[in-house]
Image (spheres, helix red, strand yellow):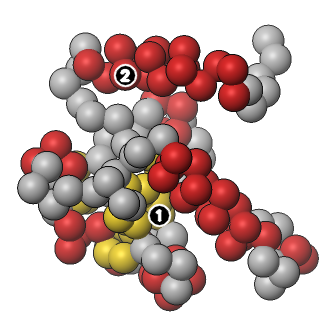
Amino acid sequence: MTIRPERPAEFDAIHDVVRAAFETTGLRPIVMLSPLAVAPDHQGHGIGTALIDTAVAAAEAAHEPLIVLEGGPAYYGSRGFGFAGDHGLTLPLPDWAPARAAQVRLLTTYDARDQTLRGAVVYPEPFCALE
């Protein structure tokens, strides 16, 4: 089996598969940017910011309403993220993580009246299997 990044020509088909999978569960798919990390010897050179900016641009282009992640509030706060709890979202954080590590970035199409954008974030199985 080979795993590779999706190609632009595949975006619509992938979107359809993901939407179909979540429609059968009653869950609403959202963009999750976790885990995101830069090797310590490469930190401080703008790599993390570039990764975030690229992900945000892709989510905006796809008309996504928000992005969630687990991360340090100071770092992500300076990059447009805020505490997810302030927007009615909860993330299943590890025991060692502070509650405010649950982060969200609201995007252009975010509508605070959309009740489907509130509640507990459910991670996909592959994410849950990570140690």
Q: Would you say residue 29 is visible in this rendering?
A: yes
Q: Quadrant of the N terminus?
A: top right
User: Dot 1, how many residues are within 10 Å of its Cα: few (below 14), some (14-19), or many (20+)?
Assistant: many
Considering depth in this image, is 60 or 115 the residue closer to the camera? 60
Considering depth in this image, is 85 or 53 the residue closer to the camera? 53
Expressed as whole percent of the image width and height from the top left, the position of residue 83 reads: 32, 75
Q: What residue is rendered at 21% in x and 49% in y?
A: 117
Q: Amino acid at mark 2?
A: Arg
Considering depth in this image, is 35 or 106 the residue closer to the camera? 106
With 104 as the anchor, is 8 left or right in this view? right
Residue 70: numbered disc = 1
User: Dot 2, how many residues are within 10 Å of its Cα: few (below 14), some (14-19), or many (20+)?
Assistant: some
Expressed as whole percent of the image width and height from the top left, the position of residue 65 reads: 34, 52
Q: Is residue 42 above or below residue 24?
A: below
- C-alpha separation, residue under disc 2 versus residue under disc 1: 23 Å
Local secondary structure at mark 1: strand
Q: What residue is rendered at 32% in x and 23% in y?
A: 22
Q: Which residue is mark 2?
A: 19
Local secondary structure at mark 2: helix
With 45 as the anchor, is 125 left or right in this view? left
Eye-nearest disc, 2 or 1: 2
Q: Would you say residue 94 is visible in this rendering?
A: no
Expressed as whole percent of the image width and height from the top left, the position of residue 97 reads: 43, 71
Ranked by sequence position, the earlier of labels 2 and 1 is 2
Tell me which corner region of the image, top left, top right, bottom left or bottom right, holds residue 130: top right
Tell me which corner region of the image, top left, top right, bottom left or bottom right, holds residue 54: bottom right
Q: What residue is rendered at 79% in x and 70% in y?
A: 47
